[in-house]
Image (spheres, rainbow, N blue to C red):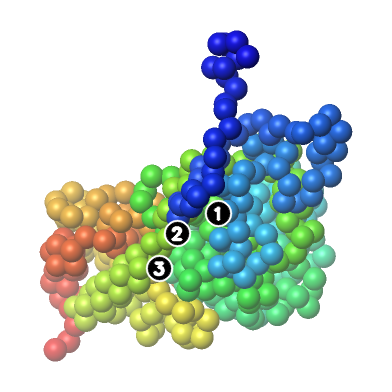
Amino acid sequence: MRDKTLCVKRPEVSHEGFASLATPTYRASTIVFDSAEAYANRSKRGPDGYTYGLHGTPTSRTLEASITALEQGLRTVLVPSGQAAITVVFLSVLMPGDTVLIPDSAYPPVAAFCENYLKPRGISHRIYDPMIGAGIDSLIDDTVKLIWTESPGSTTMEIQDIPAIVAVAKSRGVLTGCDNTWATPLYFKPLAHDMDFSSMALTKYVGGHSDLLMGSVAVKDMTLHKKLKDTMRMIGMGVSPDDCALALRGLETMGVRLAHSGRVALNFARKIADRVAPELVLHPALPGAAGHAFFQRDFAGASGVFSLVIPSHAEAALPDLLTGAQTFSIGASWGGTHSLLAPMTITRATDAHAHPGTILRINVGLEDEDDLWADLEPIIEAIATAPAVKKAV
Ligand SMILES: *Cc1c(COP(=O)(O)O)cnc(C)c1O
């Protein structure tokens, strides 16, 4: 071989004796084949074969397999964001004329996708009260093909009665899916509750360091896996092996990060509930929280995100208090090592559980607990000092 070829072709080196605990990052667009025949038959390589970098590398397959094992599923697909994990499910199973049911507490871009993308293409949606339980039966007609759930709901934190919803869906032949981002499969396993799809924004706890965007959908049925993969192939959707390597790294510490953040968050939620009207604290592990009994029945733990309803008398003080926080940062997304405060305004399509005004979403990261509490204290004080909500002593 001449020099310019030597620059391009890589010499074989020994892998013998090399054993690393790290998953190699295999980058690829092209996959090469041993023979023209193998190339011609590449589409017959099956769901786990390698054909093109977009459709999977050993790095992405390792992440998929790790999530599949945790979700107790059969296969997992990886997509570029948590939002894409939801939309790829909807696009895979809904056809013009069909209807999807979504909870009023869903991650807000879900309703926007239904309204602005699916509806003009002839796919309908109906928004239901997240606490509907078995009452979802009354919303099902022949057009309903999918019931989406998210438990707890984004910001408002309602825990849904998943077993009741699944029982109705099964009896009516409707598919079910759950956005499991908050609990992760460490604390809740939608597929083990007989749901068809379990999605996660890996962006949050799996990535865990606020530096990657990715989503996953786990299934326990190869037909549904094929539908997801077909949709992804048609749309041209895949993930980068470098991001998969970061997600694999994040996953290794997820258990201890969740345990720590969950413990501190619950401690804060209890302390706040002692100081202000307890119904202002939206944390599923607190008695009185929406769906608390379902949380106790179905979940193995709580992660580090909860919310605080800001009563109207404290709203004016909030912006300065947030800006003055020393340890918390202000921002959306969550699940990373940095603690975050995000003031949210929630609108409701049904008359379910409305909280007019601001809800403060609190994401507890890994900083010192006392430093974090020092930021929360003046916010609690602003809420608690108003006579209207001060607890009777
Ligand atoms: C953040 C989030 C998403 C979207 O994830 P992205 O990766 O930011 O698109 C979806 N669902 C829930 C519950 C989330 O918190």
Quadrant in which residue 382 is drawn: bottom left
Task: Check whether the beta carbons of the residues at disc 2 and disc 1 lie within 8 A of each other.
Answer: yes
Relative to 106, is 232 on the left or the right? right
Vertical side of 226 occupied by 80: above or below: above
Using the numbered discs, state the Cα–Cα distance from disc 2 to disc 1 in whole angstroms. Answer: 9 Å
Mark 1 highlights which residue? 63
- In the figure, 20 relative to 41: above or below? below
- Front residue of this view, candidates 35 and 311: 35
Nearer to the camera, 155 or 177: 177
Q: Secondary structure at mark 2?
A: helix
**Picture coordinates of residue 218 (x, y %)?**
63, 61
Label 2 near ligand 1 (CB < 8 Å): no
**At label 1, which amino acid type do we have?**
Leu
Instruction: Say which residue appears at 68% left-offset and 34% top-offset.
Output: 31
Query: Disc 2 designates what residue?
Result: 251
When asked about the image quadrant of residue 302, the answer is bottom left
Would you call the spot at circle 3 few (<14 residues within 10 Å), some (14-19), or many (20 or more)? some
In the picture of the structure, the residue carrying the numbered disc 3 is: 255
Q: Residue at x 57, y 26 (%)?
A: 10
Left or right placement of residue 32 versus residue 43 in this view = left
Circle 1: element type: helix
Picture residue at 37% right of the left edge, 48% below the top = 210
Contact flag, marks 1 and 3 (Cβ < 8 Å): no
Lower position in the chain sequence, tag 2 or tag 1:
1
Q: Amino acid at mark 3?
A: Gly
Give the number of callouts: 3
